[in-house]
Image (cartoon, helix red, strand yellow):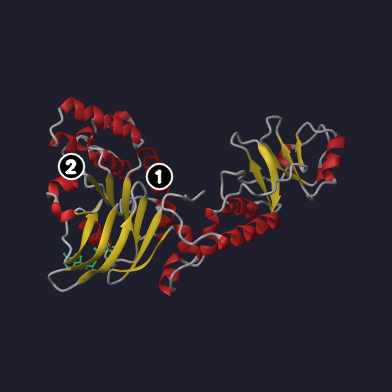
C-alpha cells in the first residue's frame, strides 16, 4: 500500500500546491486523482516517485518511508506515463519500450523480446516495432508509453493525464485496454485526470481534490455518485450523476418477457397468440434468433413478414452483462419504448419495458441504501 500521510507541498515561491493530504492507495487497483486545473494532482503524483519532495508529511510504501531507499531503486518499482507519451524520437518503438530493461543491464535480445511481448499486450501490431514515434498516431504512441512503463514489470504505475491528448473514440479504447491490462497484471495504478467520467470509469477509488490541494472526497465511484460529500463535489460530478450511477447496477435482475418474441417463420396462430401477450408490439427475430425489428402483431402476415417494414429494434443490451444504464438507454432510444435484451451470441433473450426498468432502478436504489458505506477497494467495477 502507498500511504500519503498528511503531506504538504509548498513551492519556493510560497504556492501551497498540496495541503495536508492523506490517502491510503490500495494495492493492485486503480486510484484516480481528479480535480480542477491547478489543484495539485501532478504534484501529488510526482511526490510518490520523489520527482518532487514533500515539504511536510511522509509517503510510506508498504509501511516504509519512501526517503529511506535510494531514489533510483524507488523509481525502478514505479512505471511513469505522461501525456503525449514522451517517447524518444530518435529510437524505434521496440527500443523505446526496451529502454528501462536495457538500463537494468538486460541483453539487447532479451530486452527486445520483452518489448515485443509488451507490444502485443497493449494492442500494438508487431509491424510497428521498427518504426519511429513520428510514424505512429497519438493513440498508438500512448500505447507505446504504457508498454515502456511496464517493461521492467514494476508493481506500481503512475499515470499523469495519459489519455488527454487523444480523441474520444481512441481514448475510450485506451481506457478499456488499461482496465484489461490492470485485470491481467494486477498493478497498483495511480492515475491523474481532470475528467470525472474517466475517473468514474477507471477508478477503484477516486480522490477528488479541490484548489489548494485539499482532499474533498475519497471514495469508490458509485459512492461518489450517490453521496457527494459537499456542493463542490456535487458540482464537479455534473448534472446527470443519477443516470451515470445506473452504470453500477446490473441488468441481471430485470424481468425479460419472451412472449412478445416471434421468429420470422411464425405461423398465424403463433402471431395471434403473441398479440395477446403483455406487449403492444412483437419483436421479430431471424431464424438464427437475432432481432430484426418490431411490429404491431396485426400488421404481420404469417409466411410473408416483410423485414423492410419492421420498426428498427435499435441497439440491444446484453442481459446480465450490461448495466441498468445500458438497458434504460436502449429503451429510451427504441421506437416502441421497449428495450431488446440479447444473449452473448446476439440472440434475442427477451424484451423489457421502460416501466420494468424504472422498477428495477427503484429496487437497486433501495438495496443500495441498505448496503454498508465502505466498499472494499477492488470489489466493484463499472458494468457499462
Ligand atoms: N515548480 C513550481 N513552482 C511553483 N508553483 C508550482 C510549481 N509546480 C506547480 N506549481 C503550482 O502548484 C499548483 C498545483 O499544480 P499541479 O501541477 O500539481 O496541479 P494539477 O492539478 O496537476 O493541474 P493541471 O490539471 O492543470 O495539470 C498550481 O497552482 C501550480 O501553479
Query: Is 227 placed above or below 155 here?
Result: below
**Nearest to the observer: residue 27 or residue 221:** 27
**Nearest to the observer: residue 80 or residue 188:** 188
Query: Is 242 placed above or below 81 here?
Result: below
Q: Could you give the CA–CA distance between mark 1 and mark 2, rounded to whole angstroms?
A: 26 Å
User: Would you call the spot at circle 2 few (<14 residues within 10 Å), some (14-19), or many (20 or more)?
Assistant: some
Residue lying farthest to the top in this orientation: 109
| Image-quadrant location for residue 310 | top right
Q: Is the CB–ligand 1 distance for label 2 below 8 Å?
A: no
Query: Is 348 placed above or below 69 here?
Result: above
Left or right: residue 20 compared with residue 359: left
Residue at mark 1: 179
| Image-quadrant location for residue 233 | bottom left
> Residue 23, position in %: x, y?
31, 61
Whether residue 179 is visible here, answered yes or no, is: yes
Kindly identify the residue that appears in the image at 37 percent across and 48 percent down: 29
Residue at mark 2: 88
Q: Nearest to the eye among marks 1 and 2: give it.
A: 1
Chain-order first, disc 1 or disc 2:
2
> Residue 209, position in %: x, y?
33, 66
Kindly identify the residue that appears in the image at 59 percent across and 61 percent down: 365
Whether residue 50 is visible here, answered yes or no, is: no
Identify the mark at residue 374; answer none if there is no mark. Answer: none
User: Would you call the spot at circle 1 few (<14 residues within 10 Å), some (14-19), or many (20 or more)?
Assistant: some
Residue lying farthest to the front in this orientation: 63
> Residue 25, position in %: x, y?
32, 55
Left or right: residue 233 compared with residue 89: right
**Nearest to the observer: residue 121 or residue 215:** 215
Ligand 1: give its quadrant.
bottom left
Amino acid at each position: 500500500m502507498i500511504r500519503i500521510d498528511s503531506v504538504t507541498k509548498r513551492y519556493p515561491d510560497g504556492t501551497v500546491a498540496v495541503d495536508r493530504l492523506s490517502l491510503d492507495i490500495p494495492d493492485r487497483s486503480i486510484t484516480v486523482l481528479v480535480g480542477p486545473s491547478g489543484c495539485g494532482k501532478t504534484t501529488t503524483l510526482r511526490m510518490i516517485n520523489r520527482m518532487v519532495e514533500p515539504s511536510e508529511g511522509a509517503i510510506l510504501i508498504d509501511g516504509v518511508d519512501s526517503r529511506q531507499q535510494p531514489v533510483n531503486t524507488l523509481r525502478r518499482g514505479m512505471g511513469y506515463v505522461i501525456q503525449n507519451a514522451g517517447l524518444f524520437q530518435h529510437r524505434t518503438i521496440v527500443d523505446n519500450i526496451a529502454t528501462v530493461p536495457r538500463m537494468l543491464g538486460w541483453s539487447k535480445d532479451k530486452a527486445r523480446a520483452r518489448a515485443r511481448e509488451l507490444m502485443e499486450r497493449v494492442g500494438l501490431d508487431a509491424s510497428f516495432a521498427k518504426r519511429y514515434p513520428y510514424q505512429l498516431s497519438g493513440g498508438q504512441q500512448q500505447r507505446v508509453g504504457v508498454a515502456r512503463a511496464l517493461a521492467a514489470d514494476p508493481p506500481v504505475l503512475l499515470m499523469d493525464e495519459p489519455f488527454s491528448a487523444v480523441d474520444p473514440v481512441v481514448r475510450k479504447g485506451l481506457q478499456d485496454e488499461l482496465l484489461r491490462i490492470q485485470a491481467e497484471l494486477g498493478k497498483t495504478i495511480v492515475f491523474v485526470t481532470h475528467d470525472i467520467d474517466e475517473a468514474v470509469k477507471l477508478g477503484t477509488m477516486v480522490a477528488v481534490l479541490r484548489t489548494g490541494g485539499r482532499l474533498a472526497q475519497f471514495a469508490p465511484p458509485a459512492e461518489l455518485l450517490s453521496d457527494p460529500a459537499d456542493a463542490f463535489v456535487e458540482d464537479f460530478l455534473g448534472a446527470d450523476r443519477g443516470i451515470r450511477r445506473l452504470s453500477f447496477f446490473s441488468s441481471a435482475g430485470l424481468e425479460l418477457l419472451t412472449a412478445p418474441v416471434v421468429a420470422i417463420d411464425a405461423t398465424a396462430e403463433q402471431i395471434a397468440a403473441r398479440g395477446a401477450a403483455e406487449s403492444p408490439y412483437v419483436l421479430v427475430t431471424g431464424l438464427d434468433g437475432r432481432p430484426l425489428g418490431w411490429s404491431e402483431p396485426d400488421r404481420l402476415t404469417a409466411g410473408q413478414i416483410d423485414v423492410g417494414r419492421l420498426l428498427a429494434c435499435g441497439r440491444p443490451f446484453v442481459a446480465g452483462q450490461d448495466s441498468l444504464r445500458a438497458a434504460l438507454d436502449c429503451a429510451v432510444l427504441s421506437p416502441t419504448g421497449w428495450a431488446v435484451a440479447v444473449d452473448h451470441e446476439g440472440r434475442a433473450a427477451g424484451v423489457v419495458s421502460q416501466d420494468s426498468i424504472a422498477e428495477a432502478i427503484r429496487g437497486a436504489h433501495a438495496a443500495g441504501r441498505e448496503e454498508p458505506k465502505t466498499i472494499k477497494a477492488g470489489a466493484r467495477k463499472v458494468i457499462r
